[in-house]
Amino acid sequence: MRIIYSLCIYVIFLIKLNPISVFAQSNYQNGYVVTNQNDTIFGQLRDRSPEPFGKIFRKVRLKGFWIFERRYGPKDLTSYKIGNDIYEALWYDSYSELFSVFHVNSTGRGEKVFMRLAVDGKVKLYWDEYRDPDSGYEEAIPFFQMENSHEMIRVTQGILGFKKKYLANLFVDCPELVKRMNEGFFETPEEMAVFYNLRCN
């Protein structure tokens, strides 16, 4: 008992001495969560388990100087930041119509999920991250969403690259972007979103 007690005291001492390094060993990163009540809580966050055979958690884990780990799901938060990445809690739904699949972000429709916000502005770029059940690898689907619109446009279609027809309709107010897209100027969704926000407003 005396040995166990001494070990507990030692661990507590290490956490107080250098909490960041202790948490980092468990794949926690600096960050914060923003609750639905608009409270910001800082601490050490973890939203997935390490590779190999890792998984993306449905609820983000948060540690601070309290005793127990706290867990927050999309219904509990408006957003969270882990390391340099920001995730927003969105209402997401999809439906099929005339052989096409449509995606929407509308309050109360579908389910609330976390998506990574890669670019903010008049057009936002979100990445929907998931673990592929067959390969076991982490994958992500990019979506554009225009300001004041509920529609989310899927940016790419696997190895086929950009969905140029849909993107041309989305960016119809920016012919220069559409022209450059058709010429192969953009290599990533981030480049396209940044171009639109800087050059097409």
Image (cartoon, grey):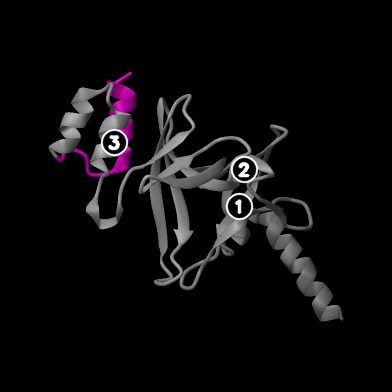
Instruction: Tell whether position 100 is magenta.
Output: no
Residue at figure coordinates x 32%, y 39% from the top left: 190
Residue 47 place in picture, x, y as percent: 57, 56
Residue 30 place in picture, x, y as percent: 57, 48
**Disc 2 to disc 3, C-alpha distance:** 34 Å
In the rendered structure, find residue 45 and report the number of the disc placed on it.
Answer: 1
The magenta segment:
184-201
Q: Quadrant of residue 181?
A: top left
Residue wearing tag 3? 167
Q: Quadrant of residue 69?
A: bottom right
Looking at this view, name the residue that lies furthest to the top.
Answer: 201
* For marks 1 and 3 on the same chain, the one whose residue lies earlier in the sequence: 1
Q: Quadrant of the N terminus?
A: bottom right
Label 3 secondary element: helix
* For marks 2 and 3 on the same chain, the one whose residue lies earlier in the sequence: 2
Residue wearing tag 2? 32
